[in-house]
Image (cartoon, rainbow, N blue to C red):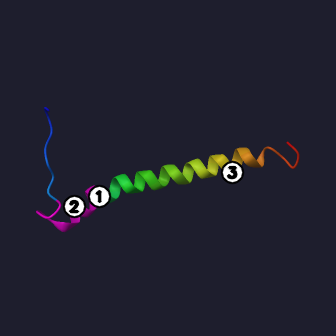
Amino acid sequence: MRGSRRISLTDGPVERTLVRLAVPIMFGLVSIILFNVVDTFYIGMLGAEP
């Protein structure tokens, strides 16, 4: 497998390791929030009677 490398979470600076872990989590949380906002908008457009 070309380009495959292992990243050790116990070596190196703590700040860089935290950022490498936090950035994907932040993108995931933002995508969930956006999904919920859009879902709420479309459900709100349904009205009282479907």
| CA–CA distance in space, label 3 to label 2 | 35 Å
Tell me the crowding category of disc 3: few under 14, some 14 to 19, or many 20 or more residues within 10 angstroms, Cα based: few
- Specify the segment rendered in magenta: 9-20
Q: Evaluate if marks 1 and 2 touch, with contact meaning CB atoms under 8 Å apart.
A: yes
User: N-terminal of the two: label 3 or label 2?
Assistant: 2
Badge 3 amino acid: Thr
Badge 2 amino acid: Thr
Q: Tell me the residue that label 3 is attached to.
A: 40
Q: Evaluate if marks 3 and 2 touch, with contact meaning CB atoms under 8 Å apart.
A: no
Badge 1 amino acid: Leu
Which image quadrant for residue 45? top right
Q: Which residue lies furthest to the bottom in this view?
A: 14
Magenta stretch contains residue 11: yes
Give SS at disc 2: helix
Give SS at disc 3: helix
Tell me the crowding category of disc 1: few under 14, some 14 to 19, or many 20 or more residues within 10 angstroms, Cα based: few
Tell me the crowding category of disc 2: few under 14, some 14 to 19, or many 20 or more residues within 10 angstroms, Cα based: some
Residue 17 is marked as 2
| CA–CA distance in space, label 1 to label 2 | 6 Å
Residue 46 placement, left or right of 21 = right
Q: Position of residue 3 (x, y in %)?
A: 14, 36
User: N-terminal of the two: label 3 or label 1?
Assistant: 1
Q: In which quarter of the image is the N terminus?
A: top left
Q: Where is residue 37 in the image (x, y as percent from the top left)?
A: 62, 51
| CA–CA distance in space, label 3 to label 1 | 29 Å
Which image quadrant for residue 46? top right
Residue 21 is marked as 1
